[in-house]
Structures are given as C-alpha cells and as structure tokens.
C-alpha cells in the first residue's frame, strides 16, 4: 500500500531529524512533509474506495449465500412435497421432508452466520486500517504544527 510507504517515509524523516539540544524539538523539512501529506490526501479516496469495494464484495457473497440457502430450502420443500405426494407411506415421507427442511434451514443458518462473521472480520480490519492511517496523519500534523510553531518563535 502506497499510503503506508508514505507514512513510513514521514516517520523516518521525523526520527532522523536533527535534534535541538535540551528542547525535545527537531529540524524537519516542512515542504517535504507537506508534500507527503498532500499525497496522502490524494491516496485516501482510493483506499476508501477499496474498502467500499471489499464491503460490496462481502455483501454480494452474503446475498449469494442467502440465495443458495433459499434455493436449498425451496428444493427441499419441493422434494418433500413430491415424496409425500407419491409415497404410499405418508408418515415416513413427512418425517423425511421435515428432516430435509431442518437440515436445509440449519445449513442456511450456518451460511448466514459465516457470512456475518466474515463481514464483521472485514469491517474490523478496515476499521483498524483506517484508524491507523488517521492516527498517523494526526501524529504527522501534530509534529508539523510543533515545527511551524517553533519556526514562528
């Protein structure tokens, strides 16, 4: 990810900056940091679009899982109805159909649960990535503000 590379560069510049004795301050090329911050602003919409795309992909997977589960349920009900219609032993057919429907519903619940767990993991990951990016930007802005304030003194 280009964003992380830029943040790493900014961090390296800050870490390797010439320190001013007894002040805890450092001399940093403000133009360089401003250029990198502009680049980050240009990149973030792409990162956010990627996150949106991943969420859309997850939603499509969830919808497909629901369609598959519904198809299984519908097919099970159809098969159960057919068995009952053509069976001489109605009770046995009824029992089999209930078992098929129960299994299909359980499978549907499992598919939905897995899709929801995947969505939660994806959202947690994206939240962490975006939070880390925002924290890095805020840290860079804070350090830049200190440098600007120092230059104004």
Image (spheres, helix red, strand yellow):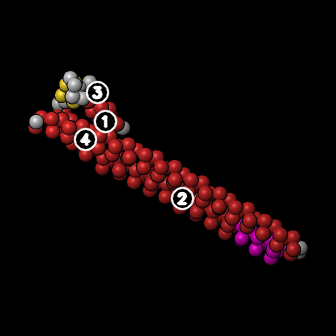
Residue 39 appears in the rendering: no
From the viewer's side, name the closer residue of 65 and 34. Answer: 34
Which of the marked residues, 1 or 2, is nearer the chain's N terminus?
A: 1
Residue annotated with mark 3: 15
Mark 2 → mark 4, Cα distance in angstroms: 41 Å
Q: Residues within 10 Å of mark 2 (few under 14, many from 20)?
A: many
Q: Residue furthest left?
A: 152
From the viewer's side, name the closer residue of 41 and 13. Answer: 13
Residue annotated with mark 1: 7
Q: Is residue 107 magenta?
A: no
Residue under the point 15% across and 39% down? 149
Q: Is residue 114 above or below residue 26?
A: below
Which of the marked residues, 1 or 3, is nearer the chain's N terminus?
A: 1
Task: Say whether residue 80 is left or right of residue 54.
Answer: right
Q: Secondary structure at mark 1?
A: helix
Mark in front: 3 vs 2:
3
Residue annotated with mark 2: 62
Provide residue 15's location: percent of width, then percent of height.
28, 27
Q: Residues within 10 Å of mark 4 (few under 14, many from 20)?
A: few
Provide residue 146's location: percent of width, then percent of height.
20, 38
Mark 3 → mark 4, Cα distance in angstroms: 14 Å
Which of the marked residues, 3 or 4, is nearer the chain's N terminus?
A: 3
Mark 3 → mark 2, Cα distance in angstroms: 45 Å
Residue under the point 61% across and 57% down? 113
Task: Say whether residue 144 is left or right of residue 137.
Answer: left
Number of disc labels: 4
The answer to whether the residues at label 1 and label 2 have Cβ atoms under 8 Å apart is no
Q: Which region shows up in magenta?
A: 76-87
Marking on residue 142: 4
Residue 40 appears in the rendering: yes
């Amino acid at each position: 990810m280009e964003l992380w590379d830029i943040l790493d560069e900014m961090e390296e510049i800050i870490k390797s900056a010439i320190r001013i004795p007894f002040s805890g301050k450092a001399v940093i090329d403000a133009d360089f940091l401003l250029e990198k911050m502009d680049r980050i602003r240009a990149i973030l919409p792409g990162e956010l679009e990627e996150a949106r795309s991943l969420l859309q992909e997850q939603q499509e997977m969830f919808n497909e899982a629901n369609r598959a589960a519904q198809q299984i349920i519908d097919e099970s009900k159809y098969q159960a109805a057919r068995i009952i219609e053509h069976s001489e032993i109605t009770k046995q057919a009824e029992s089999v159909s209930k078992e098929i429907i129960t299994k299909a519903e359980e499978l549907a619940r499992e598919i939905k649960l897995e899709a929801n767990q995947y969505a939660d993991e994806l959202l947690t990951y994206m939240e962490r990535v975006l939070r880390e990016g925002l924290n890095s930007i805020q840290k860079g802005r804070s350090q830049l503000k200190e440098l600007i304030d120092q230059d104004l003194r």
